[in-house]
Image (tube, rainbow, N blue to C red):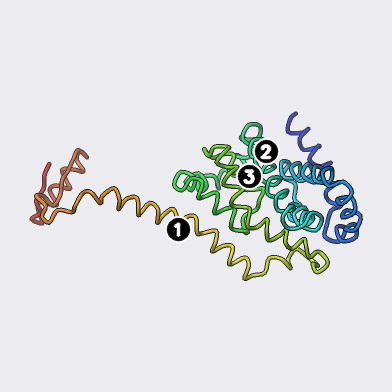
């Protein structure tokens, strides 16, 4: 019953947002700008509410809403509104999925969950940060799939807000030049996508370097011996340990059991 009600409500909101596109935004830009100048707080609250609702219900249209934020509110204020609205909406979608639709999502995307769970276990927030930075991964899919991982809500929120900030600035800035836009494809050129992908890989690389430095620091106080008493030390392992020790002895290695 909850799923049916949610779907009906989502469809109604979707029908309303379907009327929002680049062309309609251009046609109504002057009226929206005047309304913002006359009612800055009210218009900001309305915009934030619409954005959070769209993101929370996983309704397509985030790009157009982000562009609208730049067109109406300008680069700075538009970035602030979009950054918090998109992150709050994403977190609501994350929580809705985690507590109400976990089983249905797992049944549909079960084959993809192992890869994502492994990534979260290995790299934690850095994995989510990379997904947010790389523009080829859908915004809504990340929200839904991350809900089925062990990641904590506050970690999801922080990593999402940081990871989406660069893309937010790019699209909000594009919105400030609304008159020159003919499609959203004008914003994401091939070079820009490649650049964002490279930036997206950076958190994982940074974590690998950090882990390497940490390991070096741990072993820094333990100088490497110039000579070892044994070549192989076997601790437990049952029959496999005995076989390993036998092979080591056969090649004249010093073995300790």
Dot 1 alpha-carbon crowd within 10 angstroms: few under 14, some 14 to 19, many 20 or more: few
Mark 1 or mark 2, earlier in chain: 2
- Residue at image location 77% in from the left, 57% down from the top: 74
- Residue at image location 52% in from the left, 38% down from the top: 150
CA–CA distance between discs 1 and 2?
A: 30 Å
Residue located beneath label 1 in the image: 205
Across and down, in percent, residue 33 comes to 87, 55
Across and down, in percent, residue 67 comes to 76, 57
Which residue is most to the top? Answer: 1
Q: Is residue 144 left or right of residue 118?
A: right
Across and down, in percent, residue 244 comes to 17, 48
Element type where label 3 sits in the image: helix
Mark 1 or mark 3, earlier in chain: 3
- Residue at image location 30% in from the left, 53% down from the top: 216
Mark 3 or mark 2, earlier in chain: 2
Dot 3 alpha-carbon crowd within 10 angstroms: few under 14, some 14 to 19, many 20 or more: many
CA–CA distance between discs 3 and 2?
A: 9 Å
Q: Is residue 235 left or right of residue 129?
A: left
Residue located beneath label 3 in the image: 143
Residue located beneath label 2 in the image: 92
Q: Is residue 239 or residue 55 the one in the foreground?
A: 55
Above or below — where is 140 with respect to 103?
A: below
Dot 2 alpha-carbon crowd within 10 angstroms: few under 14, some 14 to 19, many 20 or more: many
């Amino acid at each position: 019953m909850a799923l049916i009600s949610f779907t009906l409500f989502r469809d109604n909101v979707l029908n309303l947002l379907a009327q929002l596109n680049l062309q309609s935004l251009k046609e109504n830009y002057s009226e929206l700008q005047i309304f913002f100048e006359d009612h800055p707080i009210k218009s900001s609250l309305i915009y934030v509410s619409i954005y959070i609702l769209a993101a929370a219900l996983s309704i397509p249209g985030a790009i157009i809403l982000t562009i609208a934020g730049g067109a109406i509110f300008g680069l700075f204020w538009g970035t602030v509104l979009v950054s918090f609205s998109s992150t709050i909406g994403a977190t609501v979608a994350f929580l809705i999925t985690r507590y109400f639709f976990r089983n249905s999502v797992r049944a549909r995307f079960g084959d993809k969950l192992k890869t994502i769970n492994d990534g979260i276990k290995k790299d934690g927030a850095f994995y989510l940060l990379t997904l947010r930075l790389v523009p080829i991964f859908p915004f809504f899919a990340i929200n839904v799939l991350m809900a089925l991982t062990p990641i904590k809500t506050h970690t999801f929120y922080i990593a999402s807000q940081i990871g989406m900030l660069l893309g937010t600035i790019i699209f909000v800035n594009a919105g400030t030049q609304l008159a020159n836009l003919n499609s959203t494809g004008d914003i994401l050129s091939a070079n820009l996508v490649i650049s964002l992908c490279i930036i997206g890989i950076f958190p994982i690389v940074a974590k690998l370097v950090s882990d390497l430095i940490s390991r070096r620091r741990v072993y820094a106080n333990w100088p490497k011996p110039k000579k070892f008493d044994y070549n192989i030390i076997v601790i437990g392992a049952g029959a496999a340990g005995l076989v390993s020790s036998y092979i080591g002895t056969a090649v004249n290695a010093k073995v300790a059991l």
